[in-house]
Amino acid sequence: MRCILLILDGLGDRASAALSGRTPLEAARTPHLDRLAAMGMTGLLHPWRLGYALPSELAHFLLFGYSWAEFPGRGYLEALGAGIPLGPEEVALLGRIFAVRRRRGELILVEEDPRVEEETARTLLAAVGEFTAQGVEVSFIPTGGIRGIVRLRGEVSAAVTDSNPIYEGRPLMEVQPLEGHEGDVRARRTARVLNAYAAWSHARLAAHPLNRARRRAGLSPLNAVGLQRAGQWRPVRPFGEKWGLRALAVAAGILYQGLCRFLGFRMAPVQDTADPARDLAGRLRQAARARQYDFVYVHTKAPDEAAHTKDPDHKRAVIETLDAALAVALEEIVPDPETLLVITADHATPSAGPMIHSGEPVPLLLLGKYTWRDRVERFAEIDCAQGALGLVRGEELMPLILNFLDRGKLMGLRDSPRDQPYFPGNYRSLRLGRQQGGDDD
Ligand SMILES: [Zn+2]
């Protein structure tokens, strides 16, 4: 058997007054998702612990069965996904340029996501592209628009805080070593260099002719660099070895591609277009046909992006268009008894209020030849709360998948020195030659 896991990014949400107290998913007309829910086993899922708002990379990492302690940092994953060469000693951060104004020696964030033409962004990013201090080389490598990866080479550490305050009206933050790393020479040096880079890049950008022209045109200047989520390579057990499943990722976006590459997935080459429903239908079709894999991860970012516009009704409408793509699941995936279909979200993204993501659990659906058919007939938060699975935590998802794939090992069997939760696992066969030099029959 094989599993197709569909992650509808940021699908979960909160009750909204604009939707008469319903969530966007509850308010949406979703006949295909509802049919799947009626046929399968449902519940709620939180990748970690209730109440904690998780970013996508961490939520995915936990859902794939890894622990917080193994996480390399989003900066590293995006660098990997963007194809930026990064040595094991080097550090990568997410960088962007944005608008600040000076107030009593502080730089107050005015606009975190200013609109800018590609050419202007490229020129300004090039002006702050290379900086060296205390033996550390800082490179801002653009990945699109005002964004990029800031790579640090030298005796550096990823154990530092962010400088981007994210919320407008707040001052840029001083970079500091993380708790427990105050005495770490590398972390202290990294913090000093990044603070020097912040001051240098602000001076350079503020004086740039393009920014003077933007000011004259009544536009906000792109006059500071914000950094966050430093990351660095670390060893990790590949997904295939950890779960005994050959895995394929059908996901666009450098973050998801970087994460899956880090975990050793094979990658299907896909890109986002202006039509997310068509993209999703195509990805599900690709997954249905990828029979040489035991685990196919399919992703769409559309619900999360819709929620970030902070318009619950827009999110409802996007969910409705995505639902049409689920016809592919009903026609090409569900009829195959050897496929387990799992549909869920990585986290909730609230389409109202100031939080970026939120900590409610999200709907979960498993549908395969062994899954129970519970009494839930709609794929939505409150309905799935009545489902047979109850509340599932991230660390339980992969074992549940192995279970319904008929691959779960009886725990306690010792077939290898390092426990492998799947069956049949890899093990070393007894070789008579090694023990006593016997002859083969
Ligand atoms: Zn989001």
Image (tube, rainbow, N blue to C red):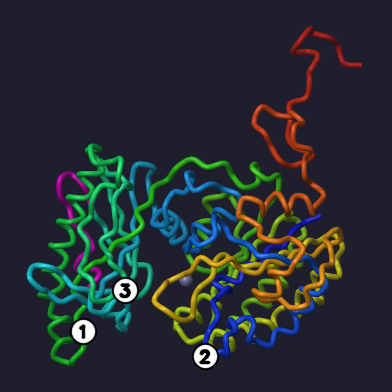
Q: Report which quarter residue 34 is drawn in.
A: bottom right
Q: Mark 2: which amino acid?
A: Ala
Nearest the eye: 125 or 363: 363
Which residue lies under the disc numbered 2?
18
**Image point 77% across, 63% down: which residue?**
388
**Image point 46% across, 69% down: which residue?**
357
Which label number is shown at residue 220? Answer: 1
Which label number is shown at residue 146? Answer: 3
Q: Is residue 380 depicted above or below 246 in this figure?
A: below
- Disc on the earlier residue, 3 or 1: 3
Q: Quadrant of the C terminus?
A: top right
Assess whether residue 247 is covered by the magenta stretch.
Answer: no
Q: Report which quarter residue 173 is drawn in.
A: bottom left
Q: Is residue 297 depicted above or below 37 in this figure?
A: above
Position of residue 419 measured from the top left corner of the image (x, y, whole percent) = 67, 34
Residue 302 seen by the camera: no
Nearest the eye: 215 or 119: 215
Please tell me whether mark 2 sits on a helix, a strand or a loop.
helix
Whether disc 2's CB lies below 8 Å from ligand 1 is answered no
- Could you tell whether 96 is left or right of 37 in the image? left
The residue furthest top is 436
Asked if labels 1 and 3 touch by Cβ distance under 8 angstroms, the answer is: no
- Disc on the earlier residue, 1 or 2: 2
